[in-house]
Structures are given as structure tokens and as C-alpha cells.
Image: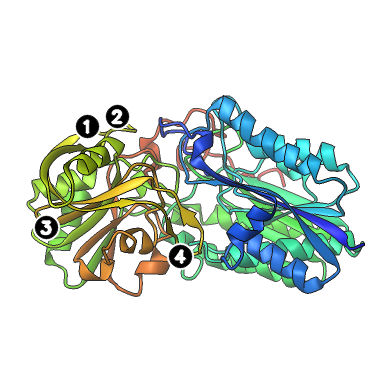
């Protein structure tokens, strides 16, 4: 009988400054074989794991449960309990396995639970037992906790930003798990905590300073004793007690090497911390640039990034374009369920007056009343660039002047081009496109954009970190505090 490798997924990135709660219904959930069907052929960690296991030929995959949601506010307590209990039950029902590969994001937070991944990892460890190896893949924006480090044998973080190595990270995780099952490695882990929150273009791994650091991590992994290495910078908007940056190095039975490399990498991050801050442009200046630039201009509305956990209902840039009487073709997206209902009631080509924005984060955004034309109506799903399915609910396209607005009932990732193309709008046909992402969009837009402008507007995921009401994260911490002692002063 072939040996069995269990696989599960749990993904949601929480922005605690977003007042709109995440609900159980916001997760797309697949159990058992449906999980494999949902991810077959995609560029995801689950697919990376299954392909490595299938190619090895000695194991069979035991799929349990995959649960993933668009980033959002804290998960309602009852819904989080339901979600985690369901995951643990599917793992318990799977019976004995030889190892487990878990694909987590790592930056979830509930209304009363600051470490859902650590909690569920402890429960999974209790179910599987200490002798069963567990490897966990993580987003490099995970909030690393003691529970996570203790409960897993190996943690394998992404190596790219924007994230283009989901599939490869799954492969790295699976290879580590197989080595553990075969008795060919004995993980020794070193962790260096860095009291710093980082943003900005220097995090781009292809061009920025962070990329140099990640390549050091890759060199560690490729060495004879290297198993996994990464810099886990945390999601700056998951304001929980463990929030800070971390260097994590796992070696094969060489604790001294792990500690030495983690400290070496950590010192470089700390010594260059001033580089890791975002340079933002005022909205007025950004609009002026868009009016006068040739080709496609892309605005990064990182402050309302649904990819980072914001509510998606900011109308700040829309208001600015309307007030400036923007004359060129503009394309943007907003979450507003009542506006979608009004559009469906009126029908295609109807001219109506709607209020847009402020339905999910009303403390920050006041609804903007506009005369609009209903260009199109949409009822169903679409697929993102990686092959996974989005769940926007109903959607409509509204126009006002030269501005096209994709309005969805539920938050979606406004990162790639398919969110617009699925609604009959191709970004290449516009002068201005507004994405709700700090940098992930670059994979899809750098090749077609003349100019990319990070815009300074308010929002629950603003890169202007001092504008946000942090209360729980590690303190003192850079850049929130003027004086932050070096984490290396006693080393």
C-alpha cells in the first residue's frame, strides 16, 4: 500500500483596521477530491505540492480541505471556529498519514483570536502526533508566531514580491516533506526577530534591496545543509501582538549554521530599514500626471488594497477624478452591493443616480452621489490569472463621463487585468487604470504601463503606516517609533 501525504489549505490575509468582518461565507471551500479538482492545473502551492508528490510515485495524496478567502477584516469568532473545526475534522477523518503539507497564508486574525494558524497547527499536531512530519508553506507577509514555529517541522516562505512563486513554494514544501518522511533530514531552526514594518519599492525582489536579501536566503537553501530560508515581513495591517519582521532559517542538523545565517541576513535587513518605506504621491499631483502623460498610467491605491485586506469601497480616487473633471479614459473598481442592486433594477443602458463607496468602511469614506449609465450587468464568477476562481457576486459596469467603474457585491482582488477583462474592459484601451494593490499588480501591468504612481489617499491598508491606529504590534517598532533599539545589541 502506498504511503500517504495529507494536504490542506487555509488562506486569508486580515487587515484589522478594516471594520468589515470576514464571514464563513466569504471562503471558497473544497473538501476531499473536490479540492484537487479545484486546483488542478493552477499555479498555486496546492498544485505544486501535488505535482511533486505525483512525480515521486511512492505516495498517494490525501486531500482534506482547502479554504481561501479574499483578504478582509477580522474573521467573526463563530465563523472562525466553524472554519478551523471543519479543517481539523477533515484531517482527523483522513486517518493515519505519513506526513502533512499545509498551504497557509499566515496572517489571519479573528475577532478574539490573534493567531488562528498557530491555534489550528497545534490542533493538527495533536491529531497527527509528534512523529508525523508537518511542513507548512507561508506567504512572506505571514505574521510569524511562536505556536507556528513550534508546531511545524519546516516552514517554507515565498521568495518573490510580487508573489509569482506560489507553485514553486509548494514544490519546495513538498520536497522538504518527502525528505523528512524518508528520514533524510533533521530540521534545526533559527529565528531572528526584527522590530520593523516595511513597505515600498525596495521590497520588489527583482530590483530592490529586499531581492538581494532573498537571494541570500536562496543560497542558504541551496547549500548542503539548507532546508528552508526566508524573510517573513508580516502583513503590516494585521495589528496583532506578534506583528514584526522575522528571518527564519532551517538547516539539516546544523543549529550553528542556521543561527549564523539568520543573524547575517537579519543584520542586512535592519541596517537598511530606512530603504523599506513607501514613496507616495498626492492625489492632486497624480491626477495631473495622468492628464499629461502619454500611454497608460496606473494608479496604485494601496490604501484600499483588497489584496492586503482593505474593504474595497474607497471612493477617494473616484472623487478626485470627478472633482478634477478628468478628461481621459479611466478604469477603476469598487465594492458596493447596494449600487449593484440599483443597476440590476434599472437594467442595461439605463441612466440612474447612485451613491458609490462607504458601504463597508463608512468611518473613512462618505458615499459619493453620481449620475451614471449602466453599461453592462454580470452575474457569475471569473478566474484570476493563476487559474483560481473569484467570487464577486453580481457585478455591473457603470460609466460617468470618461470614467468606467466595475462595481462588485463582494470584494475581489483588483491586481491583475482579468478582473477588468472579465467584465468586458481591457486595461490596454484606457489612459488610466486604478488597481487596489501595493505592488502585486506590477506582474501584469509593468509591460503595458507608461507610468506607475503610488497614490497617497486614506484607507485601512495605507502605506503611510503612521496614519494607522496601531495598538497591538510589537513596540517600539520602526517606523512607528522614533527610537527602536537594535535587535542585535546583545548578540
Between 190 and 377, the one lying in front of the other is 377
Which residue lies at the image location 27% right of the left edge and 44% below the top edge?
457
Q: Nearer the viewer, mark 2 or mark 3?
A: 3
Locate residue 246 relative to residue 421 in the image: left or right.
right
- Considering only order in the chain, which callout, 3 or 2, is on the residue closer to the N terminus? 2
Q: Give the Cα distance between marks 3 and 1.
A: 22 Å
Name the residue: 30% across, 52% down.
378
Taking the image as drawn, is residue 483 in sight? yes
* Label 3 SS: loop
**Disc 2 vs disc 3: Cβ atoms closer than 8 Å?**
no
Mark 3 or mark 1, earlier in chain:
1
Which tag is nearer the camera, tag 1 or tag 4? 4
Look at the numbered discs 2 and 4 and tell me whether their residues touch, using CB distance below 8 Å.
no
Q: Secondary structure at mark 2?
A: loop
Determine which quarter of the picture holds residue 48. bottom right
Q: Secondary structure at mark 4?
A: loop
- Relative to 184, is 230 on the left or the right? left
Of callouts 1 and 4, which one flags the residue occurring earlier in the amino acid sequence? Answer: 1
Q: Are marks 2 and 1 in contact (CB under 8 Å)?
A: yes
Front: mark 2 or 4: 4
**Neighbours of disc 2 within 10 Å: few (<14), some (14-19), many (20+):** some
Q: Which mark is residue 366?
A: 1
Residue on which the image places disc 2:
362
Query: Distance between the Cα atoms at labels 1 and 4?
Result: 32 Å
Q: Which mark is residue 385?
A: 4
Whichever of labels 3 and 4 marks the residue nearer the N terminus, that label is: 4
In the rendered view of the protein, which quadrant contains the N terminus?
bottom right
**Residue 83: percent from the left, percent from the top?**
62, 35
Image quadrant where residue 286 sits: bottom left
Q: Which residue carries the number 3 mark?
A: 402
Is residue 315 in sight in this rendering?
no
Amino acid at each position: 500500500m502506498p504511503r500517504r501525504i495529507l494536504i490542506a489549505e487555509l488562506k486569508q490575509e486580515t487587515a484589522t483596521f478594516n471594520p468589515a468582518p470576514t464571514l464563513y461565507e466569504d471562503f471558497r471551500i473544497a473538501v476531499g477530491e473536490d479540492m484537487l479538482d479545484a486546483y488542478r492545473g493552477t499555479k498555486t502551492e496546492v498544485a505544486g505540492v501535488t505535482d511533486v508528490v505525483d512525480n515521486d510515485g511512492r505516495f498517494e495524496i490525501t486531500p482534506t480541505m482547502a479554504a481561501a478567502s479574499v483578504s478582509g477584516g477580522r474573521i467573526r469568532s463563530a465563523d472562525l471556529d466553524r472554519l478551523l473545526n471543519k479543517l481539523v475534522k477533515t484531517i482527523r477523518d483522513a486517518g493515519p498519514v505519513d506526513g502533512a503539507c499545509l498551504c497557509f497564508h499566515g496572517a489571519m486574525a479573528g475577532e478574539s483570536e490573534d493567531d488562528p494558524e498557530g491555534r489550528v497547527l497545534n490542533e493538527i499536531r495533536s491529531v497527527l502526533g509528534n512523529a508525523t512530519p508537518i511542513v507548512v508553506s507561508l506567504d512572506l507577509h505571514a505574521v510569524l508566531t511562536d505556536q507556528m514555529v513550534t508546531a511545524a517541522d519546516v516552514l517554507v516562505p515565498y521568495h518573490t514580491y510580487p508573489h509569482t512563486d506560489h507553485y514553486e513554494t509548494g514544490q519546495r514544501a513538498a520536497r522538504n516533506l518527502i525528505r523528512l518522511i524518508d528520514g533524510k533530514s533533521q530540521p534545526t531552526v533559527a529565528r531572528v526577530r526584527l522590530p520593523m514594518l516595511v513597505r515600498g519599492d525596495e521590497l520588489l525582489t527583482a530590483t530592490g534591496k529586499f531581492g538581494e536579501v532573498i537571494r541570500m536566503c536562496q543560497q542558504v537553501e541551496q547549500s548542503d545543509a539548507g532546508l528552508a530560508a526566508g524573510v517573513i515581513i508580516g502583513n503590516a495591517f494585521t495589528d496583532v501582538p506578534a506583528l514584526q519582521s522575522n528571518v527564519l532559517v532551517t538547516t539539516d542538523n546544523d543549529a550553528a549554521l542556521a543561527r549564523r545565517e539568520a543573524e547575517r541576513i537579519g543584520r542586512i535587513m535592519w541596517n537598511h530599514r530606512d530603504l523599506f518605506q513607501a514613496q507616495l504621491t498626492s492625489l492632486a499631483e497624480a491626477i495631473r500626471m495622468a492628464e499629461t502623460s502619454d500611454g497608460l498610467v496606473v494608479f496604485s491605491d494601496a490604501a484600499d488594497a483588497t489584496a492586503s485586506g482593505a474593504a474595497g469601497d474607497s471612493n477617494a480616487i473616484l472623487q478626485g477624478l470627478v472633482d478634477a473633471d478628468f478628461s481621459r479614459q479611466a478604469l477603476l473598481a469598487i465594492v458596493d452591493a447596494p449600487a449593484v442592486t440599483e443597476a440590476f433594477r434599472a437594467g442595461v443602458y439605463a441612466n440612474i443616480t447612485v451613491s458609490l463607496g462607504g458601504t463597508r468602511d463608512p468611518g473613512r469614506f462618505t458615499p459619493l452621489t453620481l449620475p451614471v449609465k449602466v453599461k453592462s450587468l454580470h452575474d457569475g464568477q471569473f478566474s484570476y490569472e493563476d487559474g483560481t476562481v473569484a467570487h464577486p457576486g453580481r457585478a455591473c459596469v457603470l460609466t460617468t463621463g470618461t470614467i468606467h467603474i466595475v462595481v462588485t457585491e463582494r470584494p475581489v482582488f483588483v491586481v491583475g487585468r482579468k478582473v477588468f477583462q472579465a467584465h468586458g474592459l481591457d486595461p490596454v484601451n484606457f489612459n488610466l487604470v486604478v488597481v487596489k494593490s501595493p505592488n502585486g499588480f506590477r506582474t501584469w501591468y509593468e509591460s503595458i504601463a507608461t507610468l506607475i504612481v503610488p497614490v497617497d489617499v486614506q484607507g485601512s491598508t495605507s502605506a503611510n503606516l503612521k496614519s494607522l491606529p496601531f495598538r497591538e504590534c510589537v513596540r517600539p517598532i520602526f517606523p512607528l517609533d522614533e527610537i527602536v533599539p537594535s535587535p542585535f545589541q546583545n548578540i
